[in-house]
Amino acid sequence: MTGVTFEITDPDWVFRVDCPSRPILDQIADKWSVMAMAVLEEPRRFNEVKRRMEGITQRVLTQTLRKLERNGMIERRVLPTSPVGVEYSLTPLGRSLQEPFGVLYRWTVEHADEIRQRQQDYDARTAG
């Protein structure tokens, strides 16, 4: 957002539609990005990443890796093999997300049963 500045003293600036954090958060916090970055805890080739991320299509994985690379979270390295291979790994910027993503993942696992129960309770209340 060139030319856009925000007054840090305004506590609501992050909620504005033109806040530059919005598209970045959208790009790095979707489920496939979070999962890809977890899989890339160590460098991996494309097909290794795809095998680990059950349910992702090749097209969606390619898009996910490209946007993570564009945002500086991962790097793509062409391997001098025959046939040519590609390896992906986290950058220092991507590694800086491991701790907060880890906390979010642990919270999700710890609360999954309760959330599922609440979803069932809600569905039962609102059915019909």
Image (cartoon, rainbow, N blue to C red):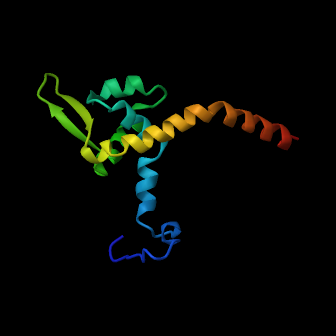
Tell me residue 94's x, y (percent). Answer: 31, 44
The residue shown at (38%, 27%) is 50
Residue 16 drawn above or below residue 105: below
Residue 72 x %, y %: 28, 49
- Say left or right for 85 vs 46: left
Residue 48 horizontal side relative to residue 22, left or right: left
Say whether residue 77 is left or right of residue 53.
left
Check the picture and name the quadrant holding the C terminus. top right
**Tag count in the figure?**
0
14 relative to 24, above or below: below
For residue 18, above or below residue 22: below
Image quarter hosting the N terminus = bottom left
Q: In the figure, residue 62 lies in which quadrant?
A: top left
The residue furthest left is 80
Question: In the image, is 74 to the left or to the right of 4?
Answer: left
Looking at the image, residue 107 lies above or below residue 84: below
Q: Which of 114 and 18 is in front in this view?
A: 114
Write the residue at 32% across / 25% down: 47
